[in-house]
Amino acid sequence: MTMKLRPTATTVALLLFLLLASSSLRAAMAGSAFCDSKCRVRCSKAGRHDDCLKYCGICCAQCNCVPSGTAGNKNECPCYRDKTTGQGARKRPKCP
């Protein structure tokens, strides 16, 4: 007597979820490596190195780009250039 196993909808859904989760994790890790390397260059001469890396990483994750060099060149990445910390008199550039 042979028993045939049929995948249930729950099993299929679980496998699909695991597949999607693992591919998303790989994409996030790759993005992080990209941002880390770009921000290390961008912040290499910053006086407040840790703060620069923190905000550069946040901006890079949102914009998927970091301007070249250690300062300036923000027109290379308009999203990065246009990020600000607030409104009115307290409005300052967010990304180093």
Image: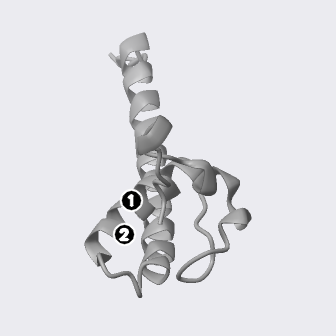
Horizontal relation, residue 60 to residue 74: left or right = left
- Total residue callouts: 2
Which residue is tagged 1? Answer: 55
Q: Is residue 33 above or below residue 83?
A: below
Above or below for 20 versus 39: above
Please name the amino acid that badge 2 sits on: Cys
Measured from the top left, where is residue 63 in percent x and y? 58, 51
Q: Residue at horizontal 59%, vertical 56%?
A: 80
Residue visible at 46% across and 29% down in the picture: 16
| Residue at mark 1 to residue at mark 2: CA–CA distance | 5 Å
Using residue 26 as the reference point, say whether residue 54 is left or right of it. left
* Residue underneath mark 2: 52
Q: Nearer the viewer, residue 85 or 64?
A: 85
Residue 96 visible to an observer of this rendering: yes
Q: Work out which residue is located at the far top of the displayed protein and give it.
A: 9
Question: Which one is in front, 21 or 15?
Answer: 21
Q: Residue furthest bottom?
A: 45
Task: Report the colour scheme.
Answer: one colour
Residue visible at 62% across and 70% down in the picture: 67
Percent position (x, y) of residue 26? 45, 55
